[in-house]
Image (spheres, coloured by chain):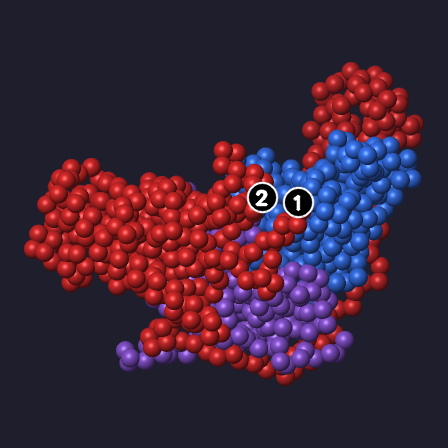
Chain colours: A purple, B blue, C red
């Protein structure tokens, strides 16, 4: 029960981000984790369709565009996860009766796609300058056949894994905002993965901070 | 349980109305925070289906029908059959759903059920294969909500599990001369259920209060929802929290404990109901 | 979401500038914006930047049955996706006029020009052929989408490799890239579309219009041509009349532009081939500009694992012990069971909840269940009574007041109680 995960696998692949790379959206970002890359664009706050109007807050729409073909049921469920996470961190009540649209385009899927969606979404929301109560990041953990934890798995590692979990962690208290799992696992494994994700989230938040610092370094 | 002496008007201030109950550790329908509504299960409700079950969790009513069909195996998985779940939330179950193609909630629920089937291995798809690379069973699990009063995911999983346990498949022999399948309707066999996944759904009120088995009103007022699915061995099959306010690991642990008890409760119910039919025959 | 409209001042300004042979971004009339071609990690994935316009093309393949009238030809499928990311005016899942136009033009440009050898895509005649699918996603719309789409699509097709197949008897095996090297498509020529926009009834002409210019133009001429100066398609839209000389002039300009672009594509393909051969990493991650201050990269980092398992242990152990027993379910009739004391289904049960004596309530329910059971039996025997649900009891009394044979059929002890219960209800009403 007490086997400690091999440290070699508990790494985050190299990751990178570019903000404001598209001219049309109000905020845009591309996020890269290893070979997995996602591009995000945000429009808003803007005029909202009457049918989607909410009287006390902004309506957030999230669209996930797969690389090949049209969005399927799987994308719908990922959209739901990303949307509800963003809704919890955005201060939507500051823009009542308006619309926000977040579009996520898959550029390459090499594992940990959902966490990459979350990271790209957060960076794009930051770039759009939308008011948020906290930042969030996504971390994917896989448990392989020997019970070892692998963070930020590649597509091949995901395929071999026994269980796969993706968490969204908030920046203020490092709690779990979103959780989506596949495969079966024990309670202890879950808690371990949550703890690992919380540790990994610190690295990503530090990266957010560094990239924002770099970005505004010249305007000071 | 002591209900509060003063409550806010329900229609004007729904959130305050519920808060005044939660302050006293009870809920507007008289339940405790961690109490489920009465769960009623009826199996074999649809005589034309190969397996079916009707589940009521309080007012939420869900019916599941299973249709088995013979089909060719796919190229990628020659030794496996497959299961196609579909959750339908028609306008008849609640005014929040519109007619037309399935909405986001219905699609997300279908995907969730498909994930639970795959993660829990309730049925091993190898069992559905009749001849490797040629013929297999496909199980269409159509789950329809008849009355929506919150916590539809839990009801769906119970309905699915009971319906699968109720399903009987006829024996299929492949005629060696004509190489066409022959179905022997006389000889029917139950499916082999490997695991018994059962879900428990929770709502978070005001970022901290956890309540179990929310009604639709509670769902719409809550700040986060989550569903925990466990099997009889205490393994987790799914921890599905699509977003909302954040929770620490300790709170999640509470949910898991409650879900484990719920699993035992429901498995007992399902087994007893299935047995009652067997003994009655 | 609607697009922001262009105001009259802007419109006049733009037209005035064009009259004076000036463009917003300082280009000359016949200048293209800067074209940048990059490739993704997979084969057949290509990004094209045309100024600020950005598109991505991805080619994929699948084994399918061929069309009946062409049993030994592969199938080409094009899909131009106007993603809402590119412009707020684009809507998800709706076929707009523009998307139909782009799709049609791309099909003409690449399928009808027979630039790809579809016969080489046949695996088993009449049974299995490759379907090559080209998905083009718009990422940023800053005018002249068509040219960017056509460059991206043809470059992606040139870059794409399909898996090798082997045929033994009637079995087709698809080899993975590790087993056998994937095969490139055979492409005869590369048609590229060049767009010309016309202003003031065709008096002024601009190559590669940007989004602002597209909004004030009167007409558009798209010429698809290959480097051998063969025209593959000409399409004029916007309803302007063009003179023969104008079209000739455009085709001459197009031939120059096409040869430039073809060279650029070939160079990009070669560079990518070299990079892949050298074993270096390639893909979107590598094409990210490092020098920009909006971009940042971080190397592979290890996650500290100190006290992770301790923390997990602590939480698991702190959790409450599970109760040893769980409530036993009630099974009133075979096939029906109930568990839990929480609120019941209110389908006609609401009056029971008012009952003060819980014992009586329980009993009554059992009675009802029993009654239901007998009803069920009744149904299966006679088939005249249609009431199955336990909740309809009252209504049965109201709807069918004369049912003499109902009460006697119940067993003595329960019928008494039932009559009492229902009479109580009626008095309440």
Q: Which residue lies furthest to the left in this view?
A: C20
Q: Mark 1 points at which residue?
A: C170
Specify whether A40 is left or right of A200: left
The reply to whether the C-beta atoms of the residues labelled 2 and 1 are less than 8 Å apart is yes
**Which chain is indicated by disc 2?**
C
Q: Mark 2 points at which residue?
A: C124
**Which chain is indicated by disc 1?**
C
The x, y position of residue B253, in whole percent, is 69, 67
Specify whether B9 is left or right of C144: right
The x, y position of residue B107, in whole percent, is 57, 46
User: Which image quadrant for residue C371?
Assistant: top right
Classed neighbour count for the residue bearing mark 2: other residues with Cα under 10 Å, few (<14), some (14–19), many (≥20): some
Classed neighbour count for the residue bearing mark 1: other residues with Cα under 10 Å, few (<14), some (14–19), many (≥20): few
Tell me if residue B181 can be seen.
Answer: no
Q: Residue at x 60, y 57 (%)?
A: C175
- Sequence order check: which comes first, mark 2 or mark 1? 2
Q: Which residue is drawn at 74% across and 34% down?
A: B49
Residue toward you, C18 or A57: C18
Specify whether B4 is left or right of C224: right
Is disc 2 placed on a helix, strand or loop?
A: strand
């Amino acid at each position: 029960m007490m086997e400690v995960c091999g440290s070699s696998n508990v790494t985050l692949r190299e990751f990178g981000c570019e903000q404001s790379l598209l001219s049309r959206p109000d905020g845009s970002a591309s996020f890269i984790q290893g070979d997995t890359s996602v591009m995000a664009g945000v429009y808003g706050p803007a005029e909202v369709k009457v049918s989607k109007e909410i009287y006390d807050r902004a309506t957030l729409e999230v669209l996930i565009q797969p690389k090949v073909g049209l969005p399927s049921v799987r994308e719908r469920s990922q959209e739901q996860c990303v949307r509800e996470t963003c809704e919890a961190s955005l201060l939507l009540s500051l823009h009542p009766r308006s619309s926000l649209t977040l579009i996520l385009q898959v550029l390459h899927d090499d594992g940990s796609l959902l966490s990459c969606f979350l990271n790209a979404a957060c960076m794009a929301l930051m770039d759009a300058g939308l008011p948020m109560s906290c930042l969030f990041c996504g971390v994917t953990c896989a448990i392989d056949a020997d019970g070892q934890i692998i963070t930020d798995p590649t597509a091949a590692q995901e395929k071999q894994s026994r269980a796969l979990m993706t968490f969204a962690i908030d920046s203020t208290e490092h709690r779990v905002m979103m959780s989506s799992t596949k495969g079966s696992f024990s309670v202890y494994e879950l808690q371990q993965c949550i703890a690992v994700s919380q540790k990994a989230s610190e690295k990503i938040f530090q990266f957010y901070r560094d990239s924002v610092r770099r970005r505004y370094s010249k305007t000071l | 349980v002591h209900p509060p002496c003063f409550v806010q008007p329900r229609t004007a201030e729904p959130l305050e109305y519920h808060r005044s109950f939660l302050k006293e550790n009870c809920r507007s329908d008289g339940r405790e925070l961690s109490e489920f509504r009465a769960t009623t299960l009826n199996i074999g409700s649809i005589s034309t289906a190969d397996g079916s079950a009707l589940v009521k969790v309080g007012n939420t009513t869900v019916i599941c029908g299973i249709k088995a069909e013979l089909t060719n195996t796919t190229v990628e998985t020659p030794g496996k059959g497959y299961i196609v779940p579909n959750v339908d939330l028609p306008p008849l179950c609640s005014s929040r759903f519109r007619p037309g193609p399935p909405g986001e909630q219905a699609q997300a629920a279908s995907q969730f059920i498909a994930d639970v089937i795959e993660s829990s291995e309730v049925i091993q798809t190898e069992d559905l294969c009749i001849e490797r690379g040629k013929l297999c069973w496909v199980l269409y699990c159509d789950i329809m909500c008849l009355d929506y009063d919150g916590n539809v995911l839990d009801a769906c999983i119970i309905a699915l599990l009971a319906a699968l346990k109720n399903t009987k498949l006829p024996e299929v022999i492949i005629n060696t001369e004509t190489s066409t399948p022959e179905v022997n309707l006389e000889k029917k066999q139950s499916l082999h259920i490997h695991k018994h996944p059962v879900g428990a759904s929770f709502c978070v009120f005001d970022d901290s209060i956890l309540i179990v088995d929310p009604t639709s009103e509670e769902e719409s007022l809550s700040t986060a929802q989550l569903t925990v699915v466990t099997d009889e061995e205490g393994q987790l099959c799914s921890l599905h929290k699509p977003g909302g306010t954040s929770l620490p690991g300790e709170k999640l642990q509470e949910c898991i404990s409650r879900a484990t008890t719920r699993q035992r409760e429901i498995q007992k119910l399902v087994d007893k109901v299935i047995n009652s039919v067997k003994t009655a025959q | 979401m609607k697009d922001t409209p262009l105001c009259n001042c802007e419109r006049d300004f733009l037209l005035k500038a064009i009259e004076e042979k000036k463009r917003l971004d300082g280009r000359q009339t016949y200048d293209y914006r800067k074209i940048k071609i990059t490739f993704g990690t997979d084969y057949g994935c290509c990004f094209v930047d045309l100024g600020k316009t950005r598109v991505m093309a991805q080619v994929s393949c699948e084994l399918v049955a061929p069309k009946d009238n062409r049993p030994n030809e592969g199938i080409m499928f094009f899909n131009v996706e106007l993603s809402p990311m590119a412009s707020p005016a684009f809507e998800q899942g709706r076929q707009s006029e523009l998307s139909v136009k782009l799709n049609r033009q791309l099909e003409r440009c690449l399928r009808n020009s027979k630039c790809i050898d579809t016969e080489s895509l046949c695996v088993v005649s009449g049974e299995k052929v490759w379907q090559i699918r080209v998905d083009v996603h718009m990422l940023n719309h800053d005018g002249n989408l068509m040219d960017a789409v056509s460059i991206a699509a043809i470059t992606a097709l040139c870059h794409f490799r399909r898996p090798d197949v082997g045929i033994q008897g009637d079995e087709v095996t698809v080899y993975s890239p590790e087993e056998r090297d994937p095969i490139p498509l055979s492409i005869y020529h590369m048609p590229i579309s060049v767009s010309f926009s016309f202003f003031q009834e065709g008096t002024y002409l601009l190559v590669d219009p940007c989004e602002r210019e597209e909004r004030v133009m009167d007409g558009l001429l798209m010429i698809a041509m290959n480097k051998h100066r063969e025209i593959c398609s000409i399409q004029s839209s916007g309803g302007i009349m063009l003179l023969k000389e104008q079209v000739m002039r455009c085709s001459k300009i197009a031939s120059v532009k096409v040869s430039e672009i073809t060279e650029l594509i070939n160079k990009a393909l070669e560079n990518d081939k070299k990079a892949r051969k050298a074993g270096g990493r390639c893909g979107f991650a590598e094409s990210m500009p490092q020098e920009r201050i909006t971009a940042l990269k971080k190397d592979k980092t290890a996650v500290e694992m100190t006290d992770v398992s301790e923390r997990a242990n602590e939480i698991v152990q702190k959790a409450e012990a599970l109760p040893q027993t769980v409530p036993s379910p009630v099974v009133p009739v075979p096939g029906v069971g109930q568990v839990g004391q929480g609120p019941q289904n209110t389908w006609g049960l609401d009056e029971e909840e008012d009952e003060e004596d819980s014992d009586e309530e329980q009993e009554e329910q059992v009675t009802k269940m029993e009654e239901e059971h007998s009803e069920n039996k009744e149904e299966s025997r006679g088939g005249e009574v249609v009431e199955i649900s336990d909740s309809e009891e009252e209504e049965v009394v109201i709807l069918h007041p004369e049912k003499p044979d109902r009460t006697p059929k119940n067993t003595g002890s329960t019928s008494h109680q039932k009559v009492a219960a229902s009479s109580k209800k009626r008095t309440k009403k």
